[in-house]
Image (cartoon, rainbow, N blue to C red):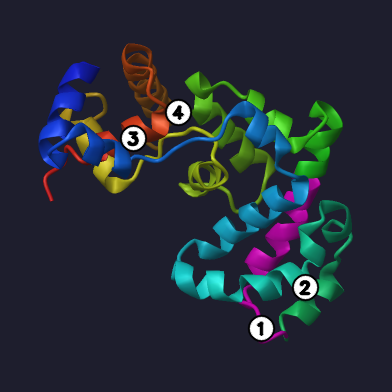
Amino acid sequence: MRDYQWLHEYCLNRFGSAAALEAHLPQVKTPEQLRAISADRYLSTLALRVFRAGLKHSLVDAKWPAFEQVFFGFDPHKVVLMGAEHLERLMQDTRIIRHLGKLKSVPRNAQMILDIEKAHGSFGAFIADWPVTDIVGLWKYLAKHGNQLGGLSAPRFLRMVGKDTFIPTDDMAAALIAQDIIDKPPTSQRDLAQVQAAFNQWHAESGRPLCQLSVMLAHTVNH
């Protein structure tokens, strides 16, 4: 596996200057900022990620004000009380995307947030305190305890709220394969552990957040 210095030099050449590279890289929120996000905003973003999956993002985003309305501002204490009859009524509401499986995920994910709040004080604290050196463990937790959060949905949700994470996109997986870190797209726990270890090494060498390393690595793949 090549060290961070190679990755940095490759991206400098690709973007032409340090300023151009930095302008292209995502930023993360501080633990304090993550703690300050309210539970309803986390639930709204979780739901937005679930509905975006497989659909045009602009289509979903345009309908989101109506989602905020029908889901009571995504207050988890209210959403968790929405039963099957309520969700069936929402299936008749033309202002929103009528996908029963995804609609059902919202109260289920509200329950996960409430369960985590009971155990950790707040969902924001739970997200903020999870170590980025085991970010794949957080993906696994969200996929197991939440609903419709498998695949890339958990890491994409975390990126949306500002929690530091890498995302194993096709380009990033191709770059990891080219570096002989893995030999196929990382879906098994073993492969994900190897990817996490590689990112932890680059993170230690560079001090950069995982999300920036993730984007830089994806740019080493020829387009």
Which amino acid, by three-letter code, is at mark 4?
Gln
Disc number for residue 70: 2
Which amino acid, by three-letter code, is at mark 3?
Ser
Foreground residue, 163 or 134? Answer: 163
Q: CA distance from mark 1 to mark 4?
A: 40 Å
Which amino acid, by three-letter code, is at mark 2?
Val
Q: CA distance from mark 1 to mark 3?
A: 36 Å
Foreground residue, 117 or 64? Answer: 64
Q: Residues within 10 Å of mark 1 (few under 14, many from 20)?
A: some
Drawn side of residue 91 relative to residue 142, left or right: right
Proximity of marks 2 and 1: CB atoms separated by less than 8 Å:
yes
Drawn side of residue 33 relative to residue 58, left or right: right
First reached walking from the N terminus: tag 3 or tag 4: 4
**Could you tell me which quadrant the N terminus lies in?**
top left
Task: Report the residue at 37% width, 23% height from top.
Answer: 208
Drawn side of residue 44 relative to residue 222, left or right: right
First reached walking from the N terminus: tag 1 or tag 4: 1
**Residue 173 visible, this orientation:** no
Percent coordinates x, y for residue 162 in the rendering: 54, 40
Which amino acid, by three-letter code, is at mark 1?
Arg
Magenta: main secondary structure: helix
Q: CA distance from mark 4 to mark 2?
A: 38 Å
Q: Residues within 10 Å of mark 3 (few under 14, many from 20)?
A: many
Farthest residue, direction front: 19
Please say if 148 is above or below 54.
above
Q: CA distance from mark 2 to mark 3?
A: 36 Å
Proximity of marks 3 and 4: CB atoms separated by less than 8 Å:
no
Proximity of marks 1 and 4: CB atoms separated by less than 8 Å:
no
First reached walking from the N terminus: tag 2 or tag 3: 2
